[in-house]
Amino acid sequence: MLSQKARYALRALVELARADGVQLTSGEIALRADAPRKFLEAILLELSRNQIVTSKRGKFGGYLLARPGGEISFAEVIRVLDGPLALAPCVSPRLGFRKCDDCPDREACSLREALLRARDATADVLEAYSLADAAVSGAPAAQLAAI
């Protein structure tokens, strides 16, 4: 399940993509994304550490996307904030891979194939959907709140 943190992050990043290179303050982003400002500031800091946004401090400071919105996928943002997309660690192809605690044999697991397909389908959709795609979809932040 997508965390509230990832939901706020995606909504905020879509608003930055819509701003099209115009720097926004955390207050402006919070208002546009319908997110609590203090929580959003912590999220933006984490996104900055992971080179998804850049920030400028001071009176005329604010946030910008670190790369064009078309180069930032929903999958990248979710992985930064929530970890692997996989429903179980044994089907994660990245650093999140590990053997499940309750499964003696990964190859004989009756759940693995379905979980692997679910992970692949989810990754296919989220890797292909960018912030730019969401920004032009026309959905205001209130509708994106349903993500």
Image: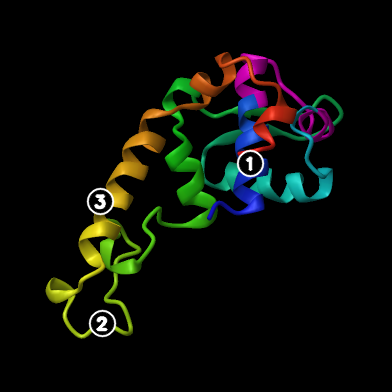
Which structural element holds mark 2? Answer: loop
Q: Which of marks 3 and 1 is nearer the N terminus?
A: 1
- Disc 3 marks a residue whose amino acid type is Arg
Determine whether, in the image, residue 84 is placed left or right of residue 15: left
Along the viewing direction, whichever of 37 and 61 lies nearer the viewer: 37
Quarter of the image for residue 141 reads: top right
Which residue is under mark 2?
A: 103
Secondary structure type for disc 3: helix
Residue plotted at (46% across, 30% down): 72
Q: Is residue 131 above or below residue 9?
A: above
Residue 47 visible in the picture: yes
Farthest residue, direction left: 107
Secondary structure mostly seen in the magenta stretch = helix
Marks 3 & 1, CB-CB < 8 Å contact:
no
Is 10 on the left-hand or right-hand side of 58? Answer: left
Give whichever of 28, 99 is nearer the camera. 99
Residue identifier under label 3: 117
Q: How far apart are labels 3 and 2 at the CA level?
A: 18 Å
The CA span between labels 2 and 1 is: 34 Å
Q: Where is residue 54 in the image (x, y as percent from the top left)?
A: 61, 33
Label 1 CA crowd tier, 10 Å (few <14, some 14–19, many 20+): many
Range drawn in magenta: 15-31
* Image side of residue 27 versus residue 91, left or right: right
Residue 9 numbered mark, or none: 1
Mark 3 → mark 1, Cα distance in angstroms: 26 Å
Dot placed on the residue nearer the N-terminal end, 2 or 1: 1
Residue 62 percent across, percent down from the top left: 75, 29
Give the quarter of the figure containing the C terminus.
Answer: top right
Q: Earlier in the sequence, mark 3 or mark 2?
A: 2
